[in-house]
């Protein structure tokens, strides 16, 4: 997953189980989206992933806790309204 995720991407937390190395509770919320601040190409101590993601909560988390969300589709700019010109009448 590390090759597909980059800084600025949105990821969905799919696993907020206790830390799988220390057993401590994690401050992540399952079902909540996080923005990736950095991808660190260090193997997670658990051996399940080849990168850690920094999402701004504590330090960095195993990438197996997240799924990459699709990028938002292009939003068209609002159309300009064409206002018909009013002819001035001469009196």
Image (cartoon, rainbow, N blue to C red):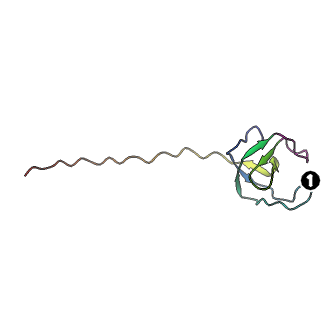
The picture places residue 40, in percent across and down from the top left corner, at 80, 42
Report the quarter where the N terminus lies: top right
Q: Is residue 42 magenta?
A: yes
Viewer-closest of 37 and 67: 37
> Which SS does the magenta portion mostly show?
loop
Which residue extends farthest left? Answer: 91
The picture places residue 41, in percent across and down from the top left corner, at 82, 39
The picture places residue 23, in percent across and down from the top left corner, at 91, 59
Q: Dividing the picture into quarters, in which one does residue 9 lie?
A: top right
Q: Within 10 angstroms of label 1, few (less than 14), some, or many (20 or more) residues? A: few
Note whether 31 is above or below 9 in the view shown: below
Q: Which residue is mark 1?
A: 21
At mark 1, the secondary structure is loop
Residue depicted at x 89% and y 61%: 24
Viewer-closest of 54 and 49: 54
Horizontally, residue 90 falls left or right of residue 19, namely left
Q: Which residues are magenta?
A: 41-50
Horizontally, residue 59 falls left or right of residue 20, namely left
Note whether 26 is above or below 46 in the view shown: below
Residue depicted at x 73% and y 42%: 5
Residue depicted at x 38% and y 46%: 80
Q: Is residue 55 magenta?
A: no
């Amino acid at each position: 997953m590390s090759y597909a995720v980059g800084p600025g991407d949105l990821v969905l937390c799919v696993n907020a189980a206790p830390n799988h190395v220390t057993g401590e509770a994690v401050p992540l919320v399952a079902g909540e989206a996080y923005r990736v601040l950095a991808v660190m190409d260090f193997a997670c101590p658990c051996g399940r992933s080849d990168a850690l993601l920094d999402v701004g909560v504590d330090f960095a988390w195993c990438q197996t806790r997240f799924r990459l969300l699709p990028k938002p589709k292009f939003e068209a700019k609002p159309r300009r309204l064409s206002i018909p010109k009013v002819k001035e009448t001469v009196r």
